Image (cartoon, helix red, strand yellow):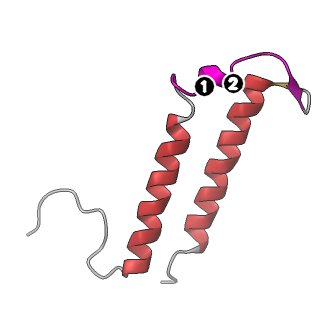
Amino acid sequence: MERGLKLFPSNSSPRHRRRRIVFAAIFFALSAALIWPVYPLASGIRPLILGLPLSLAYIVGILLLMFAAQIWLYRGEEPR
């Protein structure tokens, strides 16, 4: 009986593992872009981007990138 955190099934391919690790790195980087050291750089009201203040457009853009990363991960899943 194995104990501890199991990130990947024992029968997963190296390609599948690599894709999940890259996804985790992308997701972590995008999440970090929404907090203190980076977000204040885009926290202004002006300019307006598609009618949205810069701070809201920045958040929407990050969320769209996260969504694209999740689609990329889903499309790379092995069929079961």
Q: Is residue 53 left or right of residue 50?
A: left
Q: Is residue 24 left or right of residue 68?
A: left
Residue sitting at x 68%, y 33%: 59
Q: Is residue 56 left or right of residue 17?
A: right
Q: Is residue 39 above or below residue 72?
A: above
Residue farthest along the top direction in this orientation: 45
Q: Secondary structure at mark 1?
A: helix
Residue farthest along the left direction in this orientation: 1
Residue sitting at x 77%, y 31%: 57
Q: How many marks?
A: 2
Say what amino acid the circle numbered 1 marks: Tyr
Asked if the stretch drawn in magenta spans residue 43, the answer is yes
> Residue 2 appears at what percent x and percent y?
11, 67
Q: Which quadrant holds residue 21?
A: bottom left
Q: Which quadrant holds residue 56?
A: top right
CB atoms of marks 1 and 2 within 8 Å: yes
| Disc sitting over residue 76 in the figure | none
| Disc sitting over residue 39 in the figure | 1
| Disc sitting over residue 42 in the figure | 2
Magenta stretch: give its range.
Answer: 36-49
Q: Secondary structure at mark 2?
A: helix
Q: CA distance from mark 1 to mark 2?
A: 6 Å
Q: Is residue 45 above or below residue 33?
A: above
